[in-house]
Image (cartoon, rainbow, N blue to C red):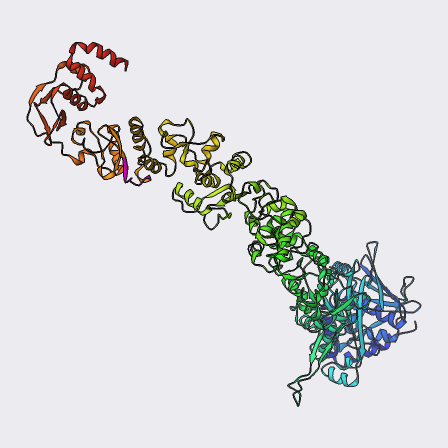
Amino acid sequence: MVDSFGTDRMRAAVLTAWTASPARFREDANAEEDFALGGYRDRLIVELAQNAADAAMRGGVPGVLRLRLDGDVLTAANTGAPLDATGVEGLSTLRVSGKRDEAGAAGRFGVGFAAVVSVTDEPAIGSRGSAAVRWSREETAALVASVPGLAPELAGRSGHVPLLRLPFETEPLSVPDGFDTVVRLPLRDKTAVEAVRRMLAETSPALPLGLPALTAIEIETDGELRRVTGDGWRLVADSGEFTAEQVAELFADRPTEERARPYWSVRWAVHMTSGEAGPLPASVPAVVHAPTPSDEALDLPALLIASFPMATDRRHVAKGPLTDFLVDKAAEAYLRLLKDLPRTPRLLDLVPALMGKGELDARIRRAILRRLPGTPLLPALSAPAPAVETASFSEAAVYEPDAQWHVEHPASEKGPDGWVIAGREAAVVAGAGELLEAIAAFVPGLLPAGWPARHPALASLGVRRVELADVVDLLSGEGVEGRDPAWWRSVYDVLPYDDPESLGALPVPLADGRLVRGPRGTLVLTGAALDLEALGLRIVHPDAAHPLLLRLGAAEATPRTVLEDTLTRTAISESLDSPDPEPVARAVLSLVDAAGLAPGELPWLAELALRGADGELYAAGELLLPGGVLAGLLEEGPLVADALVTEYGSRVLAAAGVLDGFAVVNDSDVLLDHDECDHDLDGEEDWLDHVHDLLPDLEVPPVVAEFTAIRDLELVADWPAALPLLTRPPLRAALHPLRVDGVEVPSYTAWWLAGHPVLDGRRPRELRLPGADPLLQGLYADAPPGLDESALSMLGVRTTLADLLASHGGPEELLDLMADAAIDVDRAQLRALWIALAGIEPSRVAPPSRVRAVLGGDIVVAPADDVVVVEAPDLLQLVTSRPLVLASYDLAESLSELLDLPLAGELVTGEVTSQGETRTVPAEVRSLLPTAPGTYVEHDELLVDGVPCAWRYFDGAIHCTGVDGLARGLAWAVGQWSDRLAVAALLRDPAAVPLLLAEADLS
């Protein structure tokens, strides 16, 4: 057989070298073992692919590698240049690559094929149409054993020899159709088979991506064919050749073999999913490829393949200037990769974090992050802010005050796909697309919707996060001047409702053309558009009105709420003093019309300045409607201008306070306080004082749920005509009393009428209902006919003595009337009045200065200092010279306290000063007085305090003269004073007792 590859020569040369230096044998054996079991222990598939890629590159054809595991034999068929003598020599040597002059070759160290030693003892390789080469551990061991000088070394290594140093030419191998070369590896054992099966399963697109000359790897196991390609990946590559100066600088610490290959390359690949960059597939190891996988972790969602110099273990990148150079080139290429990807938020997943999984990973990250903020990667809805630079005064030889500002626009032109800007020029706002489109003109370099504002990658890119409050601040200046109110509404449409604090300073266009900051304090007017500029109100332009403004503090204004606004009320109250009150009047009357107010609903509208028929200005409440109901009832007053009647109508003017019929004030939840209860009513404060007098002491002012009152009562001139109107519905409702904290108090209207001469020139409270309580006869005149009794009662006309005494001030009023000598009161009426007054709490009255009393048999009005209240009948005989208050004896003390008058017993001692004889009380008396005492003292002349008397009950004994005195003493002693006359009759005629008892039974 012709030795096509010179294998005999190679074996002879190696054996000669080993024989001459057994240490060389040991060195080769150790080196191959180190590579097979160390740096290349699991690199079998990688090294086969690398050789296939180099063959395809040399052959100038698309590289395809087919790996087939058939039982315990692995075959690797590839396309490309066939095996030649140089290749055989490279495979049979260590650290001597036959590819060192091939730019772009993956194999460059001359040791990769040693990976086959880890799984086989009989590797073979051959190309189509030529002989093949094989290696055999068994035959190599036999040749080594035949050299006497190597026997000790072989024995010392337990028969282990370097497998790949002695090649043997063999018969051609069967090359599959479509391929040019095949490697055949009979696997050593089951462990090797499992290792190969695992390595085949782990083969990923990283291999064809790292070996550009290799377009596909076909893997056939267990009858199934899997094709591994770089399809679906986006690639960015850069490469170059070092100059001699760079080689001297960067390769100073690298081996000579590497210096002979002055080329560099960097390639990044990212897996694309649905047109966007996705994470690395699980099958792709997250390591640096140089160009085949290393043990340098790289925790980025992209695959890096670069010509990094490797350490002696062929698994880690060596440190040094060459690595530094390639780190920078890798960073630059990575930025080009990012720029080449779709500009979507998925791009942020490719922005590296600062911390890496290893030193090299961290260095690559830092190099990328240094460049990222200035790299145009991001889409923008708006142009970036201009970069402004000025001359440096500190560096100028002479200070130049007129130095010009130089303005540079980093992205002055909008590209076909919009603006693409660097991160440090960009801004992000959290919000929906509609919001971002609306504010793009105000936020330079604004990222579109979908870019997460709080993604950490944005900070790495230098993107400025603009909060919603800052966006609101940007809505100012020239950018918003002249904006249509409808444009503002479109902005409100897209602003978020859930962040009112950030929107507090949101600009709001007003109906008067102003643009104010902040919705709070503005009014959103519903209904027809009205000209309200004269009122100075902050009314939102109707084209800008939006629910968002209400959420942010604007008030939803109806015409009524606008009328109730403080500014409106101020304008109304100051309108009479205004140099131009007409616009205020037009605005207010239009609001009254739109609100549909009824007369009296807002009583302070009566302060509005309106023109009278005489051309002068008047408060609306001073004007009368021509032909109105009140025109004939009130005192003569000015009429409202005809022009106002024509333009607004009687209804609107009456609601604004112009007098037509009686104006009714209606209010709800009224606080009965002098500061809060102010309806511009005549005497309203006095009415409040009266109400508070009727109520118990309260910690807080009471509240009336519904308040109704008739105003302008003080202007009425014709009360006979006015009262029928006031006492008929609907005005009658204003007369009904109010209930405040459980106490019934008079309404304002009833209180006012009761205190004014509205009934035939008399105050209603000075009159009584005709035919009412007879005890009031003579004290009050009868009310005139014409009004129903219920109405008269609500006006304050007196009805009964009980009602009079129950009313506030009623007892004092009665005492004043009783003290009026011009009024006739009979004795029975007087006694009834005293009995009624005895039940009054003394604190409700002030003691009178004059008192109606009984003097002798006459009714008199006497000074209070002269009057005595009699509490016992036996004392009457001692005070007959003084005016007496006489009522039931048991009420004497109450009347004494009420009137602050002395009792008779307080003025006299009542001591019996005469002597008498004790006698037995007749037994018959006990038939009427069962508890009568057994004895009494009879006097010829009874003297009490030296005054002759008929009887006296003193110190538990009855003193008397005659039958009548005894009868009174006995009745008083046993508490049966009403039986005194019957007892006297019994004492005179005891036989009359049965008749007297029968009469008593009938009583």
Magenta stretch: give its range: 844-851
Would you place residue 442 above or below residue 150 in this image? above
Would you place residue 631 above or below residue 462 in this image? above
Percent across and percent down for residue 983 are 18, 17
Percent across and percent down for residue 388 are 70, 77
Q: Is 848 covered by the magenta stretch?
A: yes
* 734 displayed left or right of 943: right
Q: Residue furthest bottom?
A: 397
Percent across and percent down for residue 23 are 72, 79
Closer to us: 160 or 365: 365
Q: Residue furthest right?
A: 129
Closer to us: 771 or 899: 771
Percent across and percent down for residue 861 are 27, 35
Q: Quadrant of residue 352?
A: bottom right
Q: Quadrant of residue 456?
A: bottom right
* 692 displayed left or right of 450: left
Q: Is 193 covered by the magenta stretch?
A: no
Closer to us: 559 or 805: 805
Can residue 216 be spotted in the picture?
Answer: yes
Closer to us: 758 or 352: 758
Could you tell me what secondary structure mostly forms the magenta stretch? loop
* 153 displayed left or right of 897: right
Would you place residue 957 above or below residue 616 in this image? above
If the image is split into quadrants, where does the N terminus sit?
bottom right
